[in-house]
Image: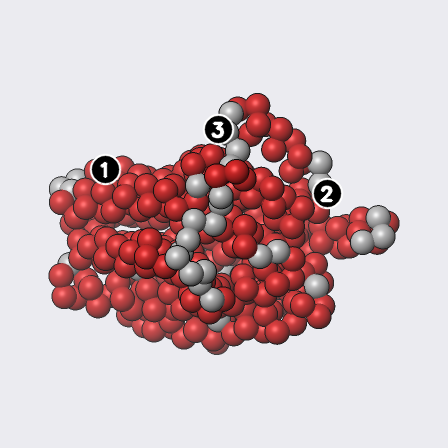
Amino acid sequence: MPRMNQTEFIALIAMMFATIAFSIDSMLPALPVIGAELSPDEPNRAQLLITTFFLGLGIGTLFVGPLSDALGRKPVILAGAAIYVTASVVAIFAESLELVLAARVVQGLGAAAPRVVGLAIMRDLYSGRIMARMMSIAMMIFVIFPAVAPLIGTGIIAISGWRGIFLAFVAFSAISMTWMSLRLPEPLPREARRPLRIDLILAAIREMASHPSVRISVIVQTFCLAVMLSMITSVQPSYDQIFGRSDEFPYWFAAVAGVSSSASLLNAALVVRLGMRRMVTWTLASQVIFSGLVLFSTLMHPGGTAAFAIFVAWQASVFFMAGTALGNLNAIAMEPLGHIAGTAASAFGAITTVLASVLAAPIGLAFNGTIQPLSGGILLLSLAGFLLMLYLGAVERRNGV
């Protein structure tokens, strides 16, 4: 089987990454509908459809990387897709919110495979700034899905109800897995595989912890992901309860995500020349300034909010940050760990997903009809990440990197 060219490879990886975004963002407009149908006494419980998916994603992430190191990349991705599709079918026919929530946990378990193993495949085939450039382009394509997913979800609900969204998940996974099966050769040869042994996994984790660049980039990635989750958790209540624009939410979300997709294109153009660390540092510095201005605006404005235009611009800046930070942080962390890429990708994904959820949850729960908790939380997370990147720069200069 001939090797994919870079363009087709990037498109496939982007689609695999987009499984997560599609599974989350297309559900946002369905939450009120599902809550009203399956939990009429407590409709807000439908928000658990997002957090339970992340729970399954974090758990699954712990296992799929080591499994792919031992068994090969493609078999693990296909097994994860089968789990994801099975859970989606269960949700289609579920008659209780509890069963849908259980299906979402299992969906997250399955969705961990294309996310984590896709990253390992990229490291199998590419490295360094070239990998960072390709990751940026993949992230740019990936961001299109958050842009259109709420609109897709709204359209599906109008045609076939909320259960049709889970049918769309089945179709999406079937397309990406068929494409991968037919066009991507197994990237991890048998002689490069590592037996699935606990002592080898622990040794790999110890090796990861021995690299300052790995430790710091994982922590900063956690903060950046927590910023994204905080915004995603609070953005719909903000449009609805603060600005009274719930009907417009899918369109504004699409516009913001579409504009923010240019961040990955910008990063792809600059990262080879400037380096990954500088790009992340400058991005976080910009977010510190922007979030600080938004928080100041809320403190000065009666009612603790800000103008709608300011909020939309700030939302765009948060999404823009993902395109210029997350891919670079992944590349920094993976650079010294190519020989244990699967285990490393699993560990990164598990740590960042679980801890980011923990950090974002209280920010979302603190929502009080204003954007003060959100802006304050994002400011603190961005500032912590920025200071750690400055420290990483000092470490690199001290080591002559």
Q: Which residue is mark 3?
A: 196
The tag earlier along the polypeptide, 3 or 2, is: 3
Against 336, residue 18 (above or below) is below
Q: Is residue 373 visible?
A: no
Distance in Å between CA atoms under marks 3 and 1: 34 Å
The quadrant in which residue 238 appears is bottom left
For label 2, the residue is 212
Q: Nearer the viewer, mark 3 or mark 2?
A: 3
**Marking on residue 144:** none
As helix, strand or loop, the secondary structure at mark 1 comes to helix
Q: Residues within 10 Å of mark 3 (few under 14, many from 20)?
A: some
Q: Position of residue 120 (x, y in %)?
A: 51, 48
Residue labelled with disc 1: 98
The residue at the point 67 percent across, 68 percent down is 272
Mark 2 residue type: Pro
User: Of callouts 3 and 1, which one flags the residue occurring earlier in the amino acid sequence?
Assistant: 1
For residue 273, side relative to residue 60 (left or right): right
User: Residue 219 location, x and y as percent?
Assistant: 62, 45
* Residue nearest the observer in this picture, 191 or 196: 191
Q: Give amino acid for label 3.
A: Leu
In the rendered image, which quarter contains the N terminus?
A: bottom left
- Disc 2: CA contacts within 10 A as few (<14), some (14-19) or many (>=20): some
How far apart are the two marked residues, 1 and 2, measured between alpha carbons?
42 Å
